[in-house]
Image (tube, helix red, strand yellow):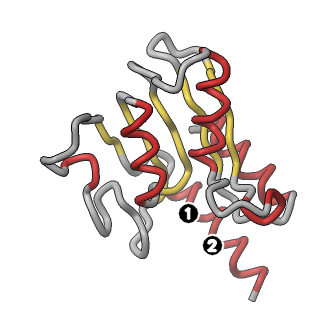
Amino acid sequence: MRLALEQAERAEDEGEVPIGAVVLSAEGRVLGYGRNRPISAQDPTAHAEIEALRAAAAAVGNYRLPGAVLAVTLEPCLMCMGAMIHARVAHLVYGAPDPKTGAAGSCMDTAALPFLNHRMDVTGGVLADECGDLLRRFFKARR
């Protein structure tokens, strides 16, 4: 999660909402980093998780990432959960919950939907205060 927080801080420095992500192999090797970039990339899909998944897939030469762990500073949205399911991520670890759009348990528990063909383990609340504080400070400064 510390690596994801570093990416979130980079996003903030670039004027983006400070969310960061990292994808690790089953052995713990970093496969890809990502940070929020929808404004600078002019791409609504440029969320931290998507950026990290793209980098990881390029690193291994396959869109499937079996056994991978994705760590992200904020609970993922529905789009990002869908991408993780398609990539066959084994474990999602997130920091702060997202009561407005969180799709890993807060608003919807996507990983538990019975009709999906892939399941992943989900661990939430890792460094939640630190992850949440970064977001709160960012939005407070914007107001």
In the image, what residue occupies the spot 80% across and 49% down?
10
Element on which disc 2 rests:
helix
Quadrant showing the C terminus:
bottom right
In the drawing, does residue 115 fall left or right of residue 138? left
Image vertical order of residue 134 relative to residue 60, above or below = below
Residue 16 in the image, given as x and y percentages of width and height: 77, 63
Element on which disc 1 rests:
helix
Q: Which mark is residue 132?
A: 1
In the image, what residue occupies the spot 54% across and 45% down?
72
CB contact under 8 Å: marks 2 and 1: yes
Image vertical order of residue 94 relative to residue 31, above or below = below
Q: Which residue is mark 2?
A: 136
Q: Nearer the viewer, residue 45 or 100?
A: 45
Image vertical order of residue 63 relative to residue 22, above or below = above
> Amino acid type of disc 2?
Arg
Q: Splitting the image into 4 quarters, where does residue 85 fall?
A: top left
